[in-house]
Amino acid sequence: MLNISNIQHFSVGDGDGIRTTVFLKGCNLRCPWCHNPETIPFEAVKLNYPKLDKTEICGKKMTAEEVFKEILEDKAFYEESGGGVTLSGGETMLQANAVAELLKLVKQDGISVFIDTAGCVPYSEFEKINTYVDTYLFDFKTASEEKYAEIIKGDLSLVKENIRKLIKAHKNIRIRIPLIPDFNIDAQSIEYMCDALRELGVKKVDLLPFHRMGSGKYEALSKEYKYKNTQLIDKKTLERIKNKFSEYFETTIEN
Ligand code: SF4
């Protein structure tokens, strides 16, 4: 069984072409800027939108066959746009066994598979699904072991080891860096991230500038959002960051 938060059709921000994004429930990290707070707990949660007179339950168990059936509804769009399926979360890799069952079906139909992950799990979890995955969208949030442990609540050495092993296994891996004010956008943090990624053998990075689009979900969950009043990154700072990464990597900015 897969523990699903929701399935988003016609998604354009989660990889190439038009995609169906399956958001999985449960995450082992605690990024305070998280845009999908409803996916963090493993159990189902209720979102209340009083102004819209709407409530939404995020969290249901589905079999691989049920999810696959829903994915197949969009197959014509994948073919036209070069799209496919993206599994995101939450942390996809925490459900690697069930994900492998689903991907086996998806690949029998020749559909492209992207996996969005923060990668803070043992490499053995990647080995369960590697043969079915076309591309990993792999988050890299900081090069500081201390910040990773204290703020994100994870183990950076595990993340780095997984990036190294996936590159060695010739897996297609796109490093995605969320740019977060007061966390990783100062010159020293950027420099450290460039050094760490070069050392790991990374060639390309996608930069994801901070946005506040998840703030409505915090309200709907009656949770405090620490980034509610944080300013977006200005153009000049974004340019400075992009220029720095471009010295070492093929760099794109995603919106
Ligand atoms: S890894 Fe992703 S889902 Fe988990 S807390 Fe961080 S941003 Fe949210």
Image: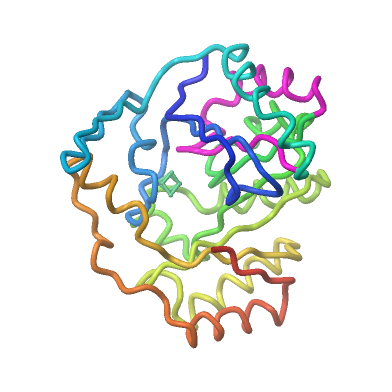
The residue lying at 43 percent from left, 65 percent from top is 210
**In the image shown, does 148 or 24 lie closer to the viewer?**
24
173 left or right of 87 in image: right
92 left or right of 199 in image: left
246 left or right of 223 in image: right
Against 240, is 81 above or below?
A: above
The residue lying at 35 percent from left, 56 percent from top is 33
Q: Residue 191 lies in what quarter of the image?
A: bottom right
The residue lying at 46 percent from left, 21 percent from top is 3
Q: Residue 104 lies in what quarter of the image?
A: top right
Magenta span includes 88: yes
Residue 4 placement (x, y as % from top left): 46, 25
Magenta stretch: helix, strand or loop mostly: helix
Against 74, is 147 above or below?
A: below
**In the image shown, does 180 or 119 lie closer to the viewer?**
180
The residue lying at 50 percent from left, 60 percent from top is 141
Which colour assignment does the render follow? rainbow
Residue 35 placement (x, y as % from top left): 39, 50
Q: Which residues are magenta?
A: 83-110
Where does the C terminus fall, quadrant-wise? bottom right
**In the image shown, does 152 or 249 lie closer to the viewer?**
249
Residue 181 placement (x, y as % from top left): 38, 72
Against 57, is 193 above or below?
A: below
186 left or right of 33 in image: right
Q: Residue 254 lies in what quarter of the image?
A: bottom right
Q: How many marks?
A: 0
Against 162, is 7 above or below?
A: above
Residue 127 placement (x, y as % from top left): 71, 31
